[in-house]
Structures are given as structure tokens and as C-alpha cells.
Image: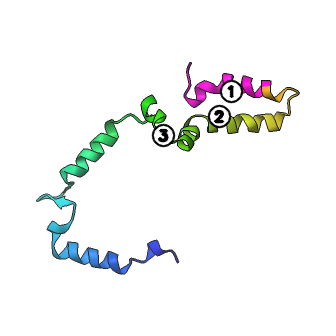
Amino acid sequence: MANSEHPTTNDIIAADVILQDPSSSSVNTMVGGAPQLPSNILQIIDHEINSPSVPSLADIQAYPTAAYFNKTVTPIIIEGLSVVAKERPKKPIEYLAAFLIKNRERFGESV
């Protein structure tokens, strides 16, 4: 059976501590019901909701080299190479170049 089906000793001890002293929990309960999260957690949630889901150009350029390629170039190259391998054109380099130009907008480049 998987570990997630059985609580660990630490889980049980943590649950006992919270049950004995509800103030030790990071989630406070208001009188009458709904849990209220600490302000730092609410700030993190607000930041995640309001931050753009697509990293900015400056963020992407700041990535380490491998991460930069994995985010920008590798997905379209792999797909293009797959198509070239499947189609086996007479001029594979030109075919790949045409594929990259034709599909660049699907991968985030609109220039």
C-alpha cells in the first residue's frame, strides 16, 4: 500500500498538537466557521493570482542556459525534428527551417 494511505508518526503528532492547541495551526478559525489564512499566505496567493502566467522577456533571459533553451527553443525544435523524421523530405534543413518559421507563433515568438 502507498504511504499516502497511512499517516506517519509525525502526521499523528502534528495533528495531536493542533487538536490540543488550535493556536499552533497556521490556519486560524473565526468564530462561526470559515478558516482564515495568515496574512503572509494571503499575500502569496494574491501575488500568484495577479502575476502574469507567462514570464517576461527579462525573466527568460535571466534563466541559466539550459533552462533558457528548454523554455524557448527545445519544444519547437523537438516537434520540428519529429515532423522531419516522419516526412523524410529531400531537403530536411529547408523543411525544418520552414516548419520553424511557420510554427513560431505557437511557441511564443510573434516576430
Helix, strand or loop status at disc 1: helix
Residue lying at 34% horizontally and 42% vertically, measured from the top left: 48
x, y (%) of residue 77? 68, 35
Quick check: 3 above or below 23? below
Is 102 placed above or below 27 here? above
Find disc 3 in the rendering and name its residue: 63
Q: Which residues are magenta?
A: 94-111
Question: Are the residues flagged by discs 1 and 3 in contact, CB closer than 8 Å?
Answer: no
| Residue furthest left in the image | 31
Q: Which residue is mark 1?
A: 100
Tell me which amino acid carries mark 1.
Leu
Residue in view at x 22 percent, y 50 percent: 40
Q: Residue at x 25, y 51 (%)?
A: 41
The numbered disc on residue 76 is 2
How far is the residue under mark 1 from the one under mark 2? 7 Å
Secondary structure category for the residue under label 3:
loop
Dot 2 amino acid type: Ile
**With 9 as the anchor, is 15 left or right in this view?**
left
Q: Residues within 10 Å of mark 2 (few under 14, many from 20)?
A: some
Q: Nearer the viewer, mark 1 or mark 3?
A: 3
Q: Is residue 54 magenta-colored?
A: no
Number of residues whose C-alpha sits closer than 10 Å to that of mark 1, classed few (under 14), some (14–19) or many (20 or more): some
